[in-house]
Image (cartoon, rainbow, N blue to C red):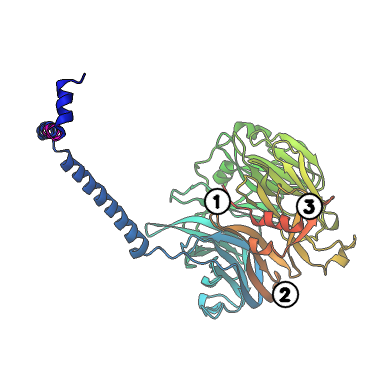
Amino acid sequence: MLDNKDLEAEIHPLKSEDRKSQENLGNRLKNEDNLKSTPPLSRLSRCRTVAFFLSLFLCLFVVFVVSFIIPCPDRPVSQRMWRIDYNIAVTYDFLAMEDINNDKIQDVLFLYKNINSSSNFNRSCIDEGFSSPCTFAAAASGANGSLLWERPVAQDVAVVECAVPQTRDGKAASACILVDRPGSFIAVNLFTGETLWSHASSLSQNAFILRPLLQVPDVDGDGAPDLLMLTQEEKQVNSYIYSGSTGLQIGHRGSLGVDGESGFLLHVTRTGAHYLLLPCASSLCGYSVKGLYEKVAQGNSPFKKDPLWEDMLNTTTHQVLPHSSGAVHHLMHVPGKAGADVLLVGSEACVLLDGQELMPRWTLRMAPGLRRPVFGYYKPDTLAVAVENGTSIDRQILLLDLSTGAILWSQALPSLPGGPPSASLPTADHRSAFFFWGLHEPVGTNETEARGAQHSLYMFHPSLPHVLLELTSISTPIIAFDVVLFEPSRHAALVLLMGPASSDTPGLVSVIKHKVRDLVPSSRVVHLGERGPDSDQAVRDRFSRLRYLSEA
């Protein structure tokens, strides 16, 4: 049976609906009373919404200002190739790189000898007090080859050393120090070409100036490193010390008592003592810089002596090597964990010497060529050195592991004496790209036949050990050559300084920049041994994708 309520709802359905509506209305009124008793959440939500859109508007406004209103700094556009020519001139074996105009691109400094400068500057030798022809220094923009400055600086330069700190009128600057063959000592502002100071030296007429010009710690207390110059006079090596900030001589001439040659090295032992290492009489000789200074200046010096080295030095001959590697061609510093070691390249062997005891770490018997070795990385982050075994037509390039002396890679690459040196540039994979000069085609064993042949520039990377890339061929004499990263992580370029080096035969002098990557598409792939699986175009593509790093 139905309940009374159900029966009534069935008989009077409208009354039932009215009752439910009244119940729902009562519930809504109760809910509204409850809402009135709670905090105003809708107002808080509106505040949050306004804050969000205000922040979004501010961010969009900042992006708009930065993107469209504030102009971005103009980035200089680097030309892929540029060239500077001088007619009836001669040049010097000197190239230096420095960002002179502060555009984040390396610029090129070079020297040439001529009667007048280019038409842009219209400076003559007579304007600077020199007779014609004289030596001009020039700085060219690495971006487009335009001359930043150019002026006569000396009569005939014998030695030049750049990046020497200077202090003038309370301002720090950097200079190139030039030693004139008549004996003048000249400092030129690296960034403007202005002559900072010039002094006549006390060199004798028959003095032959040895290279390089060395920077030594400040001995006259003016805050700038001083300069040590060696000369050879009547088979004796003499030394001169000059103030690096004024060019004035400190003390008098000092004799080392040895017969030496160019290519000496200023070495600092692990106790902080300074010594000169120089080739002499088919051996290696050493001389204490402290003893040298006290002899020429007759006063106290900031230098000190190393007891171990003093025991090694022969007081009569100053020889420091008990063994022989033949005539010494090159001395170079090699970074080590406890200090710099010394790489000695002689006519009979290549030797890595411990930087403190001068004992051989390893020795490789060979007949090294006369070109200066170049450092690089064959294995990732493992220093190697490229040396030449043999000379001219029988030349062989060797890449040696500097920690062990092991041969990592070798390749016959005929060349001629006097050719440009090799170069290297670190790559993003922690190895290096190497650049070697050699004859374009084998011409036999007669050097006379090869003198008319073209020299080619070959590129090698350890990731492709069985391939060389011939980038370009040149028949003009190359006086100086370098491969430079002109912009950080952007583009590598090679710089060539070509022309006659003798005043007896003046001719066309050219400074040329080529972007390395632009030379790759037209390069010739040279396969060493069996041909690999990659096509020539695939090899070029891999070389094009190389990324370069600045020197550490």
**Is 418 included in the stretch rendered in magenta?**
no
Residue 130 x %, y %: 56, 75
What is the magenta segment's predominant secondary structure? helix
Residue 193: image tag: none
Residue 153 x %, y %: 54, 69
Instruction: Tell me the distance, in whole angstroms, between the alpha carbons under discs 2 and 1.
Output: 33 Å
Q: Which residue is label 3 attached to? A: 369
| Closer mark to the observer between disc 1 and disc 3 | 3
Report if residue 202 is visible in the image.
Answer: no
Circle 2 residues within 10 Å: few <14, some 14–19, many ≥20: few
Circle 1 residues within 10 Å: few <14, some 14–19, many ≥20: some
Residue 504: image tag: 2
Q: Is residue 436 above or below residue 359?
A: below
Using residue 460 as the reference point, say whether residue 253 is left or right of it. Answer: left
Residue extending farthest to the top is 1
Report the magenta residues as a range: 14-22
Label 2 or label 1, whichever comes before in sequence order? 1
Q: In what element is the residue under mark 2?
A: loop
Q: Which residue is label 1 attached to? A: 215
Label 2 or label 3, whichever comes before in sequence order? 3
Task: Tell me the amino acid under the disc marked 1.
Answer: Gln
Using residue 221 as the reference point, say whether residue 479 is left or right of it. Answer: right
Q: In what element is the residue under mark 3?
A: loop
